[in-house]
Image: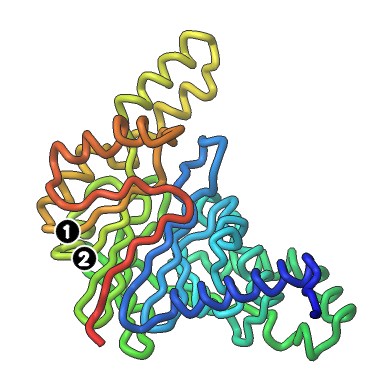
Amino acid sequence: MNRINPINRRVIKNQKNAAETAADLQRTNRITAVLCGVSSPLANRGAQTCTAVFVNGQFLVFDAGDGAMASMQKSNLPLGDLDAVFITHFHNDHYANLGEVMEWSWIFGRRLILPIHGPTGITQIVKGFESAYELEAGYRTAHHGEELMPSEWVASKAIEFSVPEDDASLVVYDKDGVIVKTFRANHAPVEPAVGYRIEFDGRIVVLSGDTVRTNALLSNSQNADLLIAEAMNKTMVQKIQKANKDIGNDVLANLLADIQDYHMDVSEVGRLAQEAKVKQLALNHLAPKPPGKLYANRFFRHPVKNNYSGVIHVGVDGMQIILPVDE
């Protein structure tokens, strides 16, 4: 009787798990949102903002902050099948890992020029990462050969758009029934900044981006099946700010004071979701990042629930939210 050695067994198991995960995520009878990163910049653990949305067999990534690549790998996402990336704005906690996503999706088998959508400025960002990774990519093709690492597919293509005015939205992606629209966010002084709305087969998924409450977000979130929204517990942030001020850490105290004016408090997120009649609400870009379920409920779920009667998901890295669609 031939026995499979432990290493071969592990490789076979990993390959089987990866294939099963890819097949499950790419099913056409549901939308799956994966919260790959839910941390804000000042958190010292977990991946920063990144959301993967699998819809009608397509794999779309929205933002790619620090740690996003490792989080996607941990969730066994099929990076070689990545179809497009969308960036909300140019704070580095939303694009720090974009170069890694560009490079590793190619290494893992991407065989298309990767479209990277974003507001004015995305061309500069993409060209910068391409320049930074040019030598690295060349080494891989030279070492492994064109058949395994074809140089024609290493490239990405920035697709730049102007931010819509007022409450309007703009279609930036339309493929096989999947439509992605963008709308204006208010993250001043960060300009431009946007959110995104995904539509497929009557289902709607909205990503707020970093923003205060706006009419554009309210309008584009109307009757959404899922709103993925940033959330800050400003009461807790103020307490942390005061503690840092008391011990003489003025730099961090001042940073904590400043960030409160361009994010939504948990109460505002709940009220907006309720007013928009959102069916499910997922919270990301969590500030402060809760250390566990107890604090997640205390900082986020309970204060949101005071204003919102729908389903609440306090995001953790790797969380999946599934929306069935008609076949």
Question: What's the amino acid at mark 1?
Answer: Val
Between 133 and 192, the one lying in front of the other is 133
As helix, strand or loop, the secondary structure at mark 1 comes to loop
Q: In the shown orientation, is residue 146 left or right of residue 96?
A: right
Residue 199 location, x and y as percent? 27, 76
Residue 18 figure quarter: bottom right
Left or right of residue 94: residue 213: left
In this figure, what is the number of numbered marks? 2
Residue 207 sits above or below residue 258 on the image: below
Q: Quadrant of residue 256?
A: top left
Q: Residue at x 42, y 49 (%)?
A: 190
Decide if residue 192 is in sight here.
no
- Name the quarter where the C terminus is drawn: bottom left
From this viewpoint, which residue is outermost toward the front? 1
Report the residue at 21% width, 60% height from top.
216
- Circle 2: residue type: Asp
Q: Which residue is mark 2?
A: 225
Do we see residue 295 in this rendering? yes
Q: Secondary structure at mark 2?
A: loop
Whether 99 is drawn above or below 198: the answer is above
Query: Quadrant location of the N terminus?
Result: bottom right
At x 49%, y 71%, the residue is 85
Query: In the drawing, what numbered circle is on residue 13?
Result: none
Residue 299 image point, x, y percent: 31, 32
The residue wearing badge 1 is 278
Q: Residues within 10 Å of mark 1 (few under 14, many from 20)?
A: many
Residue shown at 22% from the left, 57% from the top: 280
Give the image location of residue 265, x and y in percent. 27, 37
Tag 1 or tag 2, which sits nearer the N-term?
2
